[in-house]
Each structure stands twice: as structure tokens, then as C-alpha cells.
Image (cartoon, grey):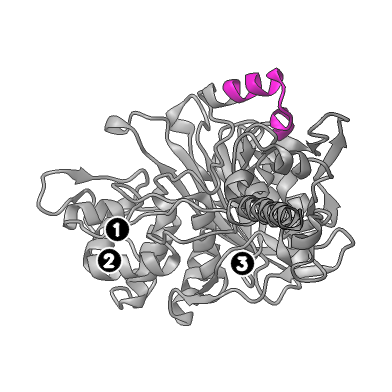
Amino acid sequence: MTRYIRHAAVFCALLLVALLGNAARIQVFQAGRYDDSPANRREVIARYGQPRGNILVGGRPVTGSVDTREQLRHERTYAHGPLYAPVTGFSSQKYGTSLLEQAEDPVLSGTAPVLTPFPLWNDFTRARNPGGDVVTTLNAAAQQAAYEGLGGRKGAVAAIEPSSGRILALVSAPSYDPAALSGNGPEVTDAWTRLNGDREKPMLNRAVRQTYPPGSTFKVVTAAAALDAGVITDLDEPTDSPDPYTLPGTTTSLTNESDGCEDAPLRVAFEWSCNTVFAKLGVDVGAENMVATAQAFGFNDTGTGIPFAVAPSTFDTTVDDAQLALSSIGQYNTRATPLQMAMVAAAVAGGGQVREPYLVERTTTAGGSTVTSTGPRPVRQVMRPSTAVRMRELMRDVVEEGTGTNAAVPGAVVGGKTGTAQHGVGNSGTPYAWFVSWAQGGSDPEPRVAVAVVVEDGSADREHITGGGMAAPIARAVMEAVLTS
């Protein structure tokens, strides 16, 4: 009898070992597979079981959460949704996240390790930290001014602080309300279908995800390259620039919108945006130097993140002289985001240096304690300081007595450059109206803001579409908002 009891005990022990082994296999070795299974809703339920952290502008949240009392309890809410959509993106129970909601999701959702007071504690307790907050660099007044300035017209505005790289405004129009995508009901599906099918593309962040031919605003880059290369040594010395200018190796003639461009000095050519002068300057500088200068400004950089990805602006590195001439006036394959063109203006304002732009100042716990902060951003030397001084002079002339007078701010020093970019087959598309600028208040030791504005549908009448008329007033409103805040 004792032997039978011993056999039964051993058999029971083996069953217990098998049970424990199977439990270990499932909970340790196969945990990842079960966690990732579409049938496992525990993580999704936990994710929305608590309020999401907030995105802050000027110390105030522009996002929130509402308790629906449903299985996925908390839905995202947005204050002034269309105004801040190009920054926040959306957080949807059905379609995931985008832009800042995506880039900072670990902090906002409470899963970031930096939010845990004790390492590995949450791994043992299965607890979830309250969502942290994301403090942005945005200037609320500048954001509002940019949004109202566009007034529903298709386009975008980007503004940055030259001395730091802080993004002060990032606006895209037309926009949308991210709250329409927050839940998981049929109305969310309808909103998603409608927004993605809209020909105006309201979910496209034109400030950082759309590239445009920059037109004459790119002449800032060409002028800097010519000065750095020594092709131009005197702003007031006549250039050898015929009008019209025949593109090298072709019979195609390039003309100007303004009179007086033949052999015009750089100061006059910049002030009145002479295509012939700058096309020839680009050829005289040469492809190697033009490419080097454009890339120093940030063109062809595929790694820019603010923290979400930015579409790379491009300057073709394999061009013949005719193509180089067109590229040097912001045409051919030259394309730029508004954020990139704001960096161009910032480089001039910053004495020839530009810092990488950024949108997040710091992240905090739900209680307000800082867990990460943005330190000094890398500095890139774009042009010689002496070149930057002369470029400031040229840009001031544009605003004081050239094509950019609509950007003048009383009591401030303002520099700018207009642009009207042709596009489409045979330049048949409605021209894009551009303006890039910087501003320095009367008591400021250095410029405080650099702005780029593009308006896609400025007017039905092509002849009246100009950067100075359509885009410069928007830039002025943004600069005034920064200087007075």
C-alpha cells in the first residue's frame, strides 16, 4: 500500500511540475505573442482606462480627456482643434496617433520608463503611470495670428526663434478638428473617410510635410553663396547680367517681372527680385558651391525631426548649367517646406548660424516634475558672419523700399524676401505666394523671430498674386505677435 501511495505522490508531483512548466511557458516565453495577439484587448483597455497626458501651449493644455464610461473609457478632446492640429495631430481609439500625439505617445500614455519612480516596479505590479504632459515651444499669440492671417486660404506658416531653434508657430490650412477621430464609433469611421477623401487634404501638415518650389525666396540662398564664394564683393557694383538671359546651352530666354534688371547690382537685383541676375549668379557660383550652401541651410537633409518627421527639402545635386540657373531662382527641382524657408531666414538673422528647430520644450509627470528637457540644439555654420551682415542689409532693403513693404512693423527692424513660384505643366498652376522674413524689436539685442509664409491659392487673378501682397501681411502679423508677447 505504501508503494502505491508513493507512486501516486510522485505522479501528482510530476503533474504539478508540468502545470508549473506550462504556466512558465505561457507567462514567460510566450508572453509576447499573447500580448501582441489581436484578440488580447487588455492592453487597449488599460491604455484608455486612464486620462491621457496633455499637450501644453503657453502653460495651458490644448488637449484633454473625457470619461465615456464605456469599455475604452477615455477619449481625447481638443481645445481649438483646427488651430493646433498641425502640431498635436490626432489620438484615435480606432486609427492610432499622428504628429506630436504619436512622437510623444510613451509620455502621454504613461508608458515611458522615465515616468516610473522605481525601475522595473511596473513590470512586477502591472501598474500604469498617469500620463505625463508635453510642454511645447509654441507662442499662442503667434499661432493665432498665423491661423487668422491665412483666413481659410490654402497654405502654411512656420515661425522659429533664430537664437534657439524654438518653433513659435506652425500652421497649416485648411485644417480639421482632431476630436472627430477620437472615439471608435461609426461617426469616427465617417469622419476618417471624409477627411482622407477631401481634395483639399486638411490632414496634410503643409508646414512640414509639403514641399513647394520656393521661387524667389531661394534667392537668399543664392545671394549668400555668391557672397561667400567671392563672386560678388560689392553690393552696389553692376553685375554682368543681360536681360533677357539665355539659359546656357539652350535657346530659352529668361526674363524679369521688373524693369531695370540688366547688369543690376546685387542690392537692386535682390530688392526687385531680378531673375536674370540670380540665374546667372548661380551659374557663376557653380554647382558645387551652390549645392554646398543649400545643404548648409538644411536642404537635402533627410533626418530632420521636431520630434515628428519633416519632409526633406531638396536642391538637385546633378544639374547642368541651364538647370542650375533655374534651380538658383527656386525653380526646376528645388523644393522646400515652409519650415525650411523659416530656417533660411533664421540663418541670416542668426549671424550666419542656424540651430536645428524643435517643438518640445520639456516633458513632465502628471504632477509637473520635469522628466526630460531639450538642451542646446546643434549649431550649423551656414555662411560667413560678414556675409550674414550683408544679407541682413539686403533683406532690410526689401522691406524698407522694395517688394516687401507690407511686412514692415512699426518700431522694429524687419528683413524679408518675396517670392512668387510658378508650378504645374507649362507653369499653368496658380502661382504660390511666398514671403520669408525676420524681425528685431527696438530694444532687442538680436532678431527674435524668423517666419516663412506660403499661400497656395492667393487669388483667382494670376497677375495679382505676389508674395508681397498675399504673404507678407501674414508674416507681419506673426512677427508683431511675437515682438509684443
Q: Is residue 6 above or below residue 70?
A: below
Task: Judge whether residue 306 can be spotted in this image.
Answer: yes
Q: CA distance from mark 2 to mark 3?
A: 35 Å
In the picture of the structure, the residue carrying the numbered disc 3 is: 165
Choose the circle earlier in sequence order: 2 or 3.
Answer: 3
Q: Nearer the viewer, mark 3 or mark 1?
A: 3
Kind of residue sitting beneath label 1? Val
Q: Secondary structure at mark 2?
A: loop
Give yes or no for contact between labels 2 and 1 (Cβ–Cβ under 8 Å).
yes
Does residue 148 appear in this view?
no
User: What is the number of the mark on residue 277?
Assistant: 1
In this view, 162 is above or below 98:
below
16 relative position to 194: left or right: right
- The residue range painted magenta reads 177-194
As drawn, the label of residue 239 is 2
| Picture residue at 53% right of the left edge, 32% below the top | 458
Task: Identify the mark nearer the N-term, 3 or 1.
Answer: 3
Give the amino acid at mark 2. Answer: Thr
